[in-house]
Amino acid sequence: MSTTTTEESLGTRIEQALRHRFSERSAAAARYGSEFVGLWQAAEEHALGGKLIRPRLLLDLARALAPAPLTADEMRSAIDVAAHVELLHFAFLLHDDVIDGDLMRRRRPNLIGALVAGRPAGPTEPALHWARSSAILLGDLLLSSAVLGFARAGVTDETRERLLGLLEETIFETVAGEHADVALSDGIITPDLRTILSTSAYKTSTYSFVLPLRAAAVLVGSSTAAEDHLAVIGRHLGLAYQLQDDLLSVFGDPDEHGKDPFSDLREGKETAIIAYARMTSQWDGIELHFGRADLSPTDGAAARDRLRECGSESFVRGLVREHLESADAALREAEAAGLLPAAAGDAIRALASRVGSRSR
């Protein structure tokens, strides 16, 4: 069987697990009324169809770490855990959209926007309140589903205990990162580079990279030392990924990445790009456009050009390289200590290559 076929079949099995979960919830919702059923049906539509980065990463590494090919039962358990990692991701996205007041994601209505659009009267204040409240409540339910999914996984008691401890740490740290991110946006804490990077590490790296890597290690019975090294690797890869995301949002081609090219500037998002710019003589000209809800394409382009001229783009690209190099150094250290097999090293290097070259 080819690698491509294997990856396609894994993606299909992850989607099937997710669809089964949403189908179960939609059926259970029927006794509570059509609106609740509609919420779960809308959630399924918005949760599926993505790249499934996190569950794929978990499964790729689990197969690479395992001393022998995973049995059918082991693969089912791994897919189930991976699917619940994706539910956790969607829960965080729902809460994030409420916090940010967003109705769109990647140029299409997010769940909140879709719920509002489905109301006969359109985007009235009651409709917005109902849609945002629905997103909060659904996010809460999906968080609990993720916890229960880990608890019910078909694994040994020792593995379950390690998985639940990892999940608890992940949720706690991600919420801490989101809390700090809001504080940065609202001017509660100083937007210096160190704080911005630590916030990104907690908010994005922890659940998007560290959780899948560590969960894979736990599922196949890797040592805690191997898990610790994977946590370091995941944190560096996650930061490189987030920094790349920030670069693409400001300097990338919107036709490729599908985002509003000036949304970060319009929202006044505190990123490493902005933190560096604040330390340059160009900041006064950039600050005029930063955080303006009515930012025009012309002014957005001018701010982007100033950010490039002041050195922000090259500085953050340098940070991306540094974190990728740090991830590779941690990987080589783990390999030298005999903690990770060659197949795991190959899988992680392939991931790092994709992070370093992404354009969307």
Image: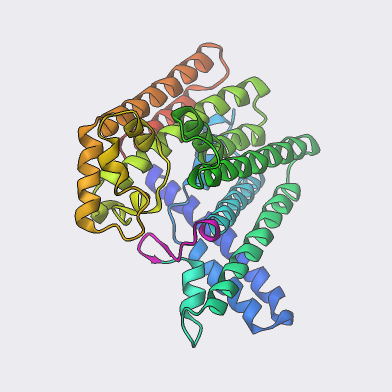
Q: Is residue 314 above or below residue 307?
A: above
Residue 21: x, y in percent? Answer: 63, 63
Is 139 situated left or right of 197 in this image? Answer: right
Q: Residue at x 32, y 33 (%)?
A: 277
Instruction: Please indicate, yes or no, whether residue 71 appears anywhere in the rendered image.
Output: no
Q: Which of 331 and 95 is in front in this view?
A: 95
Residue 276: x, y in percent? Answer: 35, 30
Q: Which of 192 and 238 is in front in this view?
A: 192
Q: Which residue is drawn at 72% across and 48% down?
A: 153
Image quadrant for the N terminus? top left
Is 254 situated left or right of 79 in this image? Answer: left
Number of disc labels = 0
Residue 134: x, y in percent? Answer: 61, 70
User: Is 19 included in the stretch rendered in magenta?
Assistant: no
Q: Residue at x 67, y 23 (%)?
A: 224
Q: Is residue 141 above or below residue 241?
A: below
Work out which residue is located at the far bottom of the displayed protein and give it. Answer: 120
The residue segment tinted magenta is 97-108
Work out which residue is located at the far top of the displayed protein and give it. Answer: 336
User: Is 107 included in the stretch rendered in magenta?
Assistant: yes
Instruction: Please indicate, yes or no, whether residue 160 appears anywhere in the rendered image.
Output: yes
Q: Which residue is drawn at 41% across and 25% down?
A: 323
